[in-house]
Image (cartoon, coloured by chain):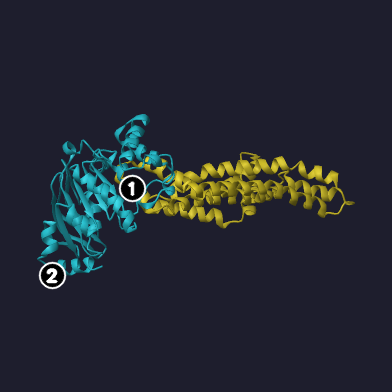
């Protein structure tokens, strides 16, 4: 049991690393995609919409396989880690772009009108008036997404990233005397322990924001 | 509130001229050839049944709605509708005109103080200290200095609307537009807002007010404009129109709102 615990825990840094890097790619990559979705030039906005639906319409595991086995630069294939964070990063940027966009679209029309009526310029209005409010309204969805990403990062184990699920699997195979369920039970606990603080933090932020709204 | 709201209003005031303004939303002709003249320093009340186009007309003055044709002149800035508007023209017009909305539209993520100071910093290029000092002075004059560090959500509707008026005034507008400023407020709260507007009128600010407050229209405004179905059906001295309307449509509207 103790051995299993240590074996699984060795995968925690990798689980966190995949999650954090993919989330960072998504959080930044989501911005240009969100701007694309908001374009007034309809054909281009439609193109972004199509891209987002394409990314979200294919299962993450299929994306990782496509990137890991399909992408080759010269004779060099991507490492499992690189393929995993690129794949999960692209998927995250599509989901987060949609979340950001939703944040802007729920803002009352009066906010934009008030900024216009005051004579504030487009950039100031977008960055200082609309964005802070959009971020506030989308923050609960962003943390919910982060929580699901912590868990979905386990898909990276299927292409050989040595995260908690990969090491649980490995331990189960290499220790036939211990029941196979033990390492996965431990992994389940560790995922919970990591996810709960994110959930608590998200509820706190939410409460603080609704006080100021 | 002994001091006037805007001491420099007298030399800053601008007139508003609207000529042959037309606006349609699809097949719905909201404004049918409207011409109207607002003298510098006067208060014009715009009344009429809902759907008459009065709010749309007001929103055309600072181009929140783009007219299909016609001209709008505020002070010495003239905008000819129909062609493409340059962003610079648009800003030039909007920066001369302040606007107060029915739903206040304060920025909820800013404190009351920042709501009033931030636009000054961006538009007039004032320093943060200057802008906040001016904001506090104006907030004090409407009795809300103690709300400076709170967020709009912590203020009552009447307080929010007074803050919205102050936010617009802090930019030294040459004319002020009010779009049903008391319609979202309880009557006793609306009085606080009307008092501030009355004081502003006394300083000689050019004001166009879309309103259902007939007392305000009669007692404060210099000129009354009655709209129905996208047209001005009657205009003139408020007291004269209210006591002796010349149009049957005006008579019907007035008896409906005054009997309420």
Q: Which residue is mark 1?
A: A114
Q: Is residue B133 left or right of residue A164?
A: left
Q: Is residue B114 left or right of residue A138?
A: left
| Chain A, colour shown | yellow
Q: Position of residue B97 (x, y in %)?
A: 24, 44
Chain letter of mark 1 equals: A
Secondary structure of the residue carrying numbered label 2:
helix
Question: What is the C-alpha distance between the residues marked 1 and 2?
Answer: 37 Å
Q: Residue at x 13, y 47 (%)?
A: B39
Q: Which mark is residue B241?
A: none
Q: Which residue is mark 2?
A: B248
Q: Residue at x 32, y 34 (%)?
A: B134
Q: Position of residue A63 (x, y in %)?
A: 61, 51
Classify 10 Å Cα crowding around label 2: few (below 14), some (14-19), many (20 and above).
Answer: few
Classify 10 Å Cα crowding around label 1: few (below 14), some (14-19), many (20 and above).
Answer: many
Chain letter of mark 2 equals: B
| Chain B, colour shown | cyan
> Quadrant location of residue B238?
bottom left
Query: Looking at the image, is mark 1 or mark 2 nearer the viewer?
Result: 2
Q: Is residue A13 left or right of residue A113?
A: right
Q: Position of residue B203 (x, y in %)?
A: 19, 42
Camera-nearest residue between B92 and B40: B40
Q: Residue furthest front?
A: B2
């Amino acid at each position: 049991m103790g051995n299993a615990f240590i074996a699984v825990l060795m995968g925690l840094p990798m689980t966190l690393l995949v999650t954090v890097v993919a989330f960072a790619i998504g959080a930044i990559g989501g911005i240009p995609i969100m701007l694309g979705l908001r374009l007034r030039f309809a054909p281009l906005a439609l193109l972004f919409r199509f891209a987002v639906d394409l990314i979200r319409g294919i299962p993450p595991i299929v994306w990782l396989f496509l990137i890991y086995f399909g992408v080759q630069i010269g004779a060099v294939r991507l490492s499992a880690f690189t393929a995993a964070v690129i794949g999960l990063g692209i998927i995250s940027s599509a989901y987060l772009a949609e979340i950001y966009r939703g944040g802007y679209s729920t803002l009352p029309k009066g906010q934009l009108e008030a900024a216009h009526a005051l004579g504030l310029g487009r950039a100031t209005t977008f960055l200082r008036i609309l964005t802070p409010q959009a971020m506030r309204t989308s923050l609960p969805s962003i943390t919910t997404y982060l929580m699901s990403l912590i868990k979905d990062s386990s898909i990276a184990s299927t292409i050989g990233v040595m995260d908690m699920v990969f090491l649980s699997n490995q331990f189960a195979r290499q220790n036939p005397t211990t029941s196979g369920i033990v390492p996965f039970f431990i992994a389940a606990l560790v995922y919970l322990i990591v996810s709960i603080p994110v959930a608590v933090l998200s509820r706190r932020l939410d409460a603080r924001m609704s006080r100021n709204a | 509130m002994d001091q006037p709201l805007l001491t420099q209003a007298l030399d800053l005031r601008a007139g508003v001229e609207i000529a042959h303004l037309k606006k349609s939303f699809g097949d719905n002709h909201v404004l049918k050839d409207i011409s109207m003249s607002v003298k510098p320093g006067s208060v014009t009340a715009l009344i009429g049944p809902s759907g008459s186009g009065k709010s749309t007309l007001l929103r055309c003055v600072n181009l929140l709605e783009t007219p299909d044709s016609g001209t709008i002149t505020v002070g010495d800035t003239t905008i000819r509708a129909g062609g493409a508007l340059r962003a610079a023209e648009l800003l030039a017009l909007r920066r001369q005109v302040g606007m107060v909305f029915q739903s206040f539209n304060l920025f909820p993520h800013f404190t009351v103080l920042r709501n009033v100071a931030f636009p000054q910093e961006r538009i007039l290029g004032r320093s943060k200290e200057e802008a906040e000092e001016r904001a506090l002075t104006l907030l004090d004059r409407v009795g809300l200095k103690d709300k400076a560090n709170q967020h709009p959500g912590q203020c009552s509707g009447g307080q929010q609307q007074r803050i919205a008026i102050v936010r617009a005034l802090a930019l030294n507008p040459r004319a002020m537009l009010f779009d049903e400023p008391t319609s979202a407020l309880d009557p006793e709260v609306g009085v606080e807002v009307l008092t501030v507007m009355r004081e502003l009128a006394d300083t000689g600010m050019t004001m166009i007010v879309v309103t259902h407050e007939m007392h305000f229209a009669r007692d404060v405004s210099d000129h009354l404009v009655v709209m129905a179905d996208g047209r001005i059906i009657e205009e003139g001295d408020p007291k004269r129109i209210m006591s002796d309307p010349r149009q049957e449509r005006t008579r019907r509207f007035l008896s409906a709102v005054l009997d309420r």
